[in-house]
Amino acid sequence: MSNIDVPINSKIAVGLSGGVDSAVSALLLKQQGFEVSGIHMQCWDYDARGCTGKKDRADAVEVATLLGIKFISLNFQEEYRQKVLDHFFAEYQAGRTPNPDVLCNKEIKFGLFLNWALANGYSHIATGHYAALNKSTFYELTRPKDATKDQTYFLYQLGQKELSHAIFPLGDYTKKEVRELALKNNIPVAQKDESFGVCFIGNIDLKDFLATNAGFMPKLGNVLDVDGNIIGSHMGAYAFTIGQRHGFTLNKYQGEPRYVLKKNVATNEIIVGSQADCMSSVFAITNIHWVGKVFEQPFTCDCRIRHLGQLYPCSVNPSSLTVSLEKPAYAVASGQSAVFYKDGLVLGGGVIA
């Protein structure tokens, strides 16, 4: 748990997803003597295509039974739709590429779940995120031991209230060590595959998901080059992201691969260019958020523009809301987040404009 001090008589609500990470988190806390409950959150229709929720809930029940902890199921389907998916759909409609996991952590796990836990006598919530906490002047969100599983990118919108009631038991463990602990303690999901895709929903086909749940239907549109010439076609600008090189058809060979540079959902057009055209050194951000210390003057740090992506040395100007990278980055996508790091600490971040 890093160097945060949690009284041993504390009641801890563990978000029990049905995966090995949350299961081992509950195991570790119970072994340390805390009063632990396993809380499973349903945020999507279990019968929806691609949703693994029914199996995940059954696995969570099995884990709670093995550990001898109370199991509670919460239903946040309506709130998830309003707080996460409506924004997700609106961002695609606006031509951006959102990251629902960032909003899911802020609004659901460290919003609704945390508020429920505090209202029901729990002092802290714990999750299976690979992240760590320290307490100095502020509660500090730090990168975990396992850099290959670092999930702090998704947590940068948390603040002092949330972190003061949070525990990340896996911050000092690698994924390999977590699986070994699960096997040693006969955790039934020890070898369960990792979950990917949209938070609480699973691995989805984006076009199908947007069509089924938000009315985004395939529609023939033009592919333009950087000079505005029509050079091909596609079936819906909304589904593309910056840097993508597949999913559209070119009328003739262009001499080298073409990548999506921009998209215009209103006109249903995408603009493509060379890989070099996808490189950016300066970009703007919105909705800036600080984890602890508030930065008002320009400063230098490292910046990550996608989950587990490269850390780019950069300078940040909080007044003009601009980020300047020392070296150009590939495919800086509007709607994704830029997260700032310094010596292993997560300082904060913003949404790429």
Image (cartoon, grey):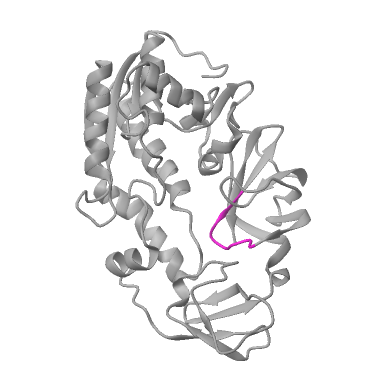
- Residue 178 sits above or below residue 295 on the image: above
| Residue ID at (32%, 54%) | 82
| Residue ID at (60%, 32%) | 143
- Residue 16 sits above or below residue 80 on the image: above
User: How far across and down, in percent of the image, does residue 73 sit?
Assistant: 22, 33
- Residue 135 sits above or below residue 243 on the image: above
Q: Say whether residue 124 is visible.
A: no
User: How far across and down, in percent of the image, does residue 207 sit?
Assistant: 37, 68
User: How far across and down, in percent of the image, does residue 196 sit?
Assistant: 41, 47
| Residue ID at (36%, 78%) | 218
Residue 82 highlighted magenta (yes or no): no
Residue 333 highlighted magenta (yes or no): yes
Label the magenta part by its dominant secondary structure.
Answer: loop
- Count the marks: 0
> Residue 320 versus residue 216: which sits nearer the camera?
216
Residue at the limit of the structure toward the left, as seen here: 47
- Point out the stretch of residues depicted in magenta: 331-338
> Residue 117 versus residue 225: which sits nearer the camera?
225
**Screen quadrant of the C terminus:** bottom right
User: How far across and down, in percent of the image, does residue 123 sit?
Assistant: 38, 20
Q: Say whether residue 207 is visible.
A: yes
Residue 215 appears left or right of 322: left
